[in-house]
Structures are given as structure tokens and as C-alpha cells.
Image (spheres, rainbow, N blue to C red):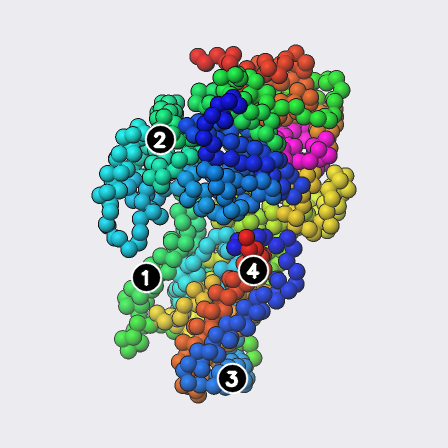
Amino acid sequence: MRLEPVANPGLIRSLGFPAAALALSVVVASFLALLAGANPFDTLGLILKGAAGSQFAALETLNRATPLIFTGLAVAVAFRAKLWNIGAEAQLYMGALVTVLLGTSALGLPGPQPLILIGLAAMLGGALILLGPVFLKTRFGVDEVVTTLLFNFIMLLLISLLLEGPLKDPMGMGWPKSPRLDPEARLPRIVEGLRLHWGFALALICAAAVWVIETRTTLGYEIRAVGLNPRAARFAGIPVNVVLLKAAFLSGGLAALAGFSEVAGLKGSLTLDLSPGFGYTGIIVAMLALLHPIGVVVSAIFVAGVFVGADSMSRAAGVPTYIADILLATALLFMVLAILLARYRIVRN
Amino acid sequence: MADKTEAREVVLRLEGITKIFGNLKANDAINVTLCRGEVIALLGENGAGKTTLMNILFGHYTADEGTVEVFGRTLPPGATGAALKAGVGMVHQHFALANNLTVLDNILLGTASLWSPGGGKDAARARVTALAEDFGLAVDPDEKIAKLSVGERQRVEILKALYRNARILILDEPTAVLTPQESDALFETLRKAVEQGLSVIFISHKLHEVMAISDRVLVLRHGKLVGETPTSKTTPQALAELMVGAEIDQPVPSEAKPGAALLSLRGVSVHPPGHRTGLQSIDLELRAGQILGLAGVSGNGQGALAELISGEARPERGEMWLGPAKATKWSPRAALAAAIGRIPEDRHSTGSIADFSITENAILESYKDPEMSSAGWMRWSSAVAFTRQLIARYDVRCPGPETRIRLLSGGNMQKLILGRALESSPKIILANQPVRGLDIGAVTYVQERLIAARNEGAAVLLISEDLDEIMGLADVIRVMSDGRLSPEFPRGSVTAPELGRWMAGEGFNYAA
């Protein structure tokens, strides 16, 4: 057997296969629910109800989706340029750190100015820690998978150090937790009384912006060219290394906004458990969306729904929440397979 | 020769091998026989079909027609590993060795049973040492690959094949990465192998090596076996002529009216990374309204020259002048700004982006022009209009500008790249192997366009391995050999055998 490229994948291959991948992962999850002694239909129903069954559940899902949209976009932009940014987690924490540093220092600016300033500074922070590894890649050929991955641990240890030391909240009863943000640095709720903050709206705006950049600007064209064939791009006069640095700047900035949005919109302070792996889950989100920025929004809400729904299902049905991880992991595996099979057909010798 | 073949045992027989890719016949009814204790050379330019033939032998491709027979047994078509089991060993140009393992481990890799950890290693070491001694392949079995020189690594590859009881050795461009001394040692090894009854296929396009090592030469060209002769009865010049052969149906250019030099190289040297041939202090002038044909066996520095002119590489020593101005800050973008139209050697990997649409490929070099984008925003509607124009003017057969370029045939892809280069009215045109792999119709079309551009005053540098293409199109001819350039020969003042001698490296001043 071998793989042969498909000349022109039609609608069935390019959309039907990914849909089939999702369906298959649900089948696998159902089987596991059966193993855990629960009725699979009830389990899936409970997950769905827990994710979107009520206004509270739906808003909880959107809240959980918000950081995933940012990290998913960050990964999608970088992967589009074949820049393997595995460090969205580190960039997220950098964004959160900048948010806390500026947000607790009483900027005293009127209106939304402090938030805009903090948001931009957070993006800059996240962008800068991705520029380092990418500079090493373009200059010396250092593999960015390794460097960006290691940055996650460096960043987490740095935050841990700060939260035990200079950043520790004096009023925090000894917990490793930063002081709370000034009110001027908090992202308000979109509708008063509903638990959904402006971070979600910002995430949607960013997704639209990334889509416009990728399809309408010279930078997007350059990023796609470099990702698909760096050699031809270089020959045609596209400054490949500069484009990679620009893509890194965009990617790091987007991931940092996840940290900004979580701290300023939801938590109000920085703790070590700010992110339960949003940076890594962003990779799943981006892959499920086939790197499409609008698709990222959809897949982030799907992934968040699975997590939120599984939490509530677990309480009701007693099936462990790990089923959410398995569901997403199998969805990712099947999706990778579906992408491959959409572009190649298997030929028997 | 016939007596000799019949008298000796035939160990490998390829019969009537035909392989067609799309509209390209990569192998056209090729017959090869190899006898016990014989070295045959497979000679041919890039794209002549050597690699395809070997891939068929090893089952990586299935031949459309023909059979492969090793030691009298027909191999099942398309079965990878069948040739290896039957006793055929191949040493690739790029070695397949694990750098962090020892020589012995590399040789055992894939042969030792997983169920005998550590067992049999001493016996294996003894066998490897014995083989190394028999064949003059001095190498320490316990040394790590990473510490070995390129020549030593090649010896390990040969040992690997011998350890697996290969009775037929195939060496693909074995000397491309070796120093002359290492090459001599390799030839010594091959002689010993032949004495012990092994047979060798030596794939190369270096004429003097073929003359030195082989008993019989087979010349491939455009997928056809165009010549088969005992080495003792031929000359390097005759082989060079066979290799580049006679083309049909070429447009005949009118009298040239050369003008001023638009691009000059003065004492330029370049050393590309890796083991590729660079440029050794060359002088070159490209004049307006003239086609300069650069002949030569591939791998003699043409790649380095093309990279230099296209902006991918910079002169390390010497100067490059664009008309009256010295070129500084040289880059692909600078080359485009200097109105150099470029047709790269490899249209698939360098000239186009396979998964981009025709439009996206058409504007690769011009997307920053005000017509295509302004202030960072793409103007897709004018890009599509431009592409439609190219498609119409250069006769690109395609469903439409949104089609992915990977779906086009080689000829149509090349027409688009040609159009992209010519549409900006370049003053200098770099055409590197512009018609390789194209069907006859596309060949004529591309050549006519180049002549038309020259008639309008462009300076054209035509790099080709096809001597007839050069002799038919070029107003002046130069030959490249080992990074050096021959003097200029005006059209008609030189014969193919004379050029063949220059290609074989004669006539150059080695002291320089």
C-alpha cells in the first residue's frame, strides 16, 4: 500500500472527512462511557446539556472558549508559516504577568485607556518571548519545537518564583497569588448581570482580524508562501526570515491576549493555576479548525463545550471527566488522519 | 562485446523497461544486462532516467512494461526489498547511516535478530573485519559514524551491502562527495570486488571516471538507451556527444545585433555550501540583444552561477556590474529590481508553490508592485486580471486562475513561469534548463519566446546540458567545467566534438 496525492479533493473529502473524524471520536467516547457502566446516550446527552443546556452553561462554555480562541489563533498563525510554536502556554503567562504588573500599578488613566495600554503591553510581552526562539531558528537553525516548549517551563517557574516573592499578595493569607487588579484594569462584562466578559468579544475581533490578515494583506500572502514553500518564497524575493519573525510576533501577541483576558476578565489576579494547559489545547483547537481563523472560533467553542459538559456530566452520571480528554485526543487523531486522507488516497500495489 | 556477454554468466537483466509519468516517458524500452565480474557505467544527464530505472529495479516504482531478472529469477514488480534479498546492494549518493551509532551497529542495523540482544556481535565484528580486509575498506568497526570522513562513511555503506551478501553493487554518483584521493581508493575497492566475482553498476555523469573504471558504458538520454559500447572502444568526447545528443525541430534565430554589456562578472568566485562546485574567478559579459549559451556537464558550477545571477547568492570575491553600476547588496529582490527575469532550473521546488493558485504563483515576484498591493493590502482583483492576461498571452492551458498550480502539466507550469519572468520586460534573462522535461511543443514555444525577447534587446543567459539546444539557439557559446569558463565561441565557429573536449575539461588553464 502507498499514498497517492488526490488531484482535486472535492467537498466530501475536504469537509466530509473532518466531520466523519469528529463523529468517530464521539463513537469511541460512547464506547468508553459504556465501559464505565453508563448509558452512552445519556452520557452524551448530559455532556451536551452541561455545555449548552442552559444560559449559565452556555456562557460558561463561551468563557472557557475565550482563552482557547486566542491560543488557537496563535497556533494557527504560526503553523500557517510552518513555525511550530508549542510555547503558547509561556506566551499566555507572559501576557498575564504583564497584565498584573501594569494592572496593579494604578495607572490613573481615564476611560478604556488603561485596558488598551495593558492589552498592547501584554501582546508585546508575549511576542518578545517568541521572537527569541524564532531568532535562534532563523539565525542558527535551532529547532523551535524544543525552544518554545522549554519556554513553557521557564515561564511557569518564573511566575512561581515571583508569586512566592515580589509579586505575592500581602493580603493573600500566604497563598501564592498576586494582588488583585485595580478596577480600571478589569475587563467589564458585555451585558451587566451575565457572566461573560469583553475578552470573548475581543477574541472574536481577533479571529476576524487574523482572517483578514491572512486573506487580504501582503503579510498574510507572505506567511502562506513561506509556509508552503520557503525555497520558492526566497527565490521570489520574499524575505523569509523577516516573515517568520512577523508571524512569530503575531502569534506570541495573540497567545498573550489569552493571559490578559483570563486575568483582566475572569480571575482578577494571577495564580499558578491560571491556565489548565490552554496553550497546549490551543494546538488541538487550531488543528481541528484546519488552521482557519474562523474555524478556530468554532473548534474552541466545541472543545470548551466538551470540557464544561464533561465536568457537569461527571457530577451527574459518575463517569470520570477524563472522558473529555479522551474525546478530544481521539478527535485530534482522527482529524489528522482525515486531513491526510482528504489529500491522499490509499493505493494497493 | 557480444561474445564476452554470452561467455559470462548474466547476473542482472532489465528487459524492455518502460515507465511513463503523465506525458513524459521517463524510461523507454530500456534493456540492460550485467555479467559476473563486470563494471558497467550508466551515463546520462539529470532527468535522463537513471534514477527511475534504479527505482524500478528496487521496486519503488512499478514499470509499465518490462521485467527485472536477478540471477535468473524474475522479481515481482513493485515489491520493495525483493532486489535486496536477491543480492543487489545500493550505495546512495546521500548515505543512510545513524551518526550516533558505531560502524558495526550501522552494519548490523536491520539484519540482526531482535531476539538475540548483544549475541553474535563478536562473530559479526570478525566478519566485517574480514570483509574490510578483502576489499580494502579500512575502517574501525567500533568507531562512531559521526567521527568518520565522508569517504569512510561511503566505505561503511559498501560494507553494509557486502555484509548483506550483495553480489551486485550499484553506486549512485559515488564520487560526487569524494576528494580525488578518496575516489582513487574507491576505484581500488571496486577492482577488488570485481576480482572476487561481484558485478558493479556505476552511475555517473563524470566522463573521465566512467572511462577509468568501467568495462562497458550505457548512455541514457531522455529516457532512451542511446548508446552501449565497450569502454575501450570509445572516447570521452564521443560519450559527451551521445549524452547530450541531437534535438529535433528547433527554431532558428535571426542574425544577432549585440549591444552594450548589461551584466558583467569580473573575477567572481563563489563557494556554495556542501560539496557543490562553485565558481573560480570567472569573467562573464551578458550583452543586450544576444543569447549566451552556457554548455557543460551538469554539476560543474552552472548552479552556482545561476544562484549568483538570480540573487540567491553573492559574489565572495570579484565584482558584479549591472551596466555601468556596480551591484551591491545583492538579493533576489535586488535582482528583480535590476530587471532580471529568472527562469529557475527546478520549476516545482523553486519556481512555484504547488498548493498556491495560478494567480498566487503569477504574482510571487510582483506582489509588492503598486498594481498588486498598496500599503500592505492585496489587490486581488487586479492580480486575477493580470493572471488572466498571462494565461492568454502565454497559452497556459488551465481551468482558470484559481486552479492550484500543482494540477498543471510541466509545460503549462513552465509557460506561466516564463510569462511571469517576461511580462515585466526584463533587460536580462536567466534561463536555467528552461525546456528540460517538456514535450516538443512546449520546448519550441519556450525557445521562440526567448529568441523574441533577445530580438527586443534583452541579454539572455541560456544554461543547458543539451548541446544541440545551445548550438541552435545561442549567438555565442561558452563552456563551463569545474567552475571555470571557456572563451566565447561565436555561433557556427565551433563543432560539437570541440565543445565536448571543453566539457571534458580540456583546454582550461589549470594554473589559474
Above or below: residue A137 compared with residue B446:
below
- The amino acid at mark 4 is Leu
Q: Describe the element under mark 3 as helix, strand or loop.
A: helix
For this rendering, which residue is in front, B65 or B144? B65
Which amino acid type is shown beneath numbered disc 1?
A: Leu
Chain for mark 1? A
Q: Quadrant of residue B288?
A: top right
Q: Nearer the viewer, mark 1 or mark 3?
A: 3
Three-letter residue code for mark 2: Gly
> Residue at the left extreme?
B122
Counting from the top left corner in percent of width and height, residue B50 is at: 54, 34
Tell me the residue that label 1 is attached to. A158
Q: For the residues marked 3 and 4, what is the alpha-carbon distance in whole angstroms? A: 29 Å
Q: Quadrant of residue B419?
A: top right
- In the image, is residue B436 part of the stretch drawn in magenta? yes
User: Can residue B174 be spotted in the picture?
Assistant: no
Q: Let me know if marks 3 and 4 both belong to one chain.
A: yes
Q: Are marks 4 and 2 on the same chain?
A: no
Distance (Cα) linking label 1 and label 2: 49 Å
Q: Nearer the viewer, mark 1 or mark 2?
A: 2
- The vertical placement of A106 against B428, above or below, is below
CB under 8 Å between discs 3 and 4: no
Residue corresponding to mark 4: A341
Magenta-highlighted residues:
B417-444
The local crowd at label 2, few if under 14, some if 14 to 19, many if 20 or more residues have their Cα within 10 Å, is some
Which type of secondary structure does the marked residue at label 1 adopt? helix
Q: Which residue is label 2 attached to? A: B151
For label 3, the residue is A41
Mark 3 or mark 4: whose residue is earlier in sequence: 3
Do discs 1 and 3 belong to a common subunit? yes
User: Residue B341's image quarter?
Assistant: top right
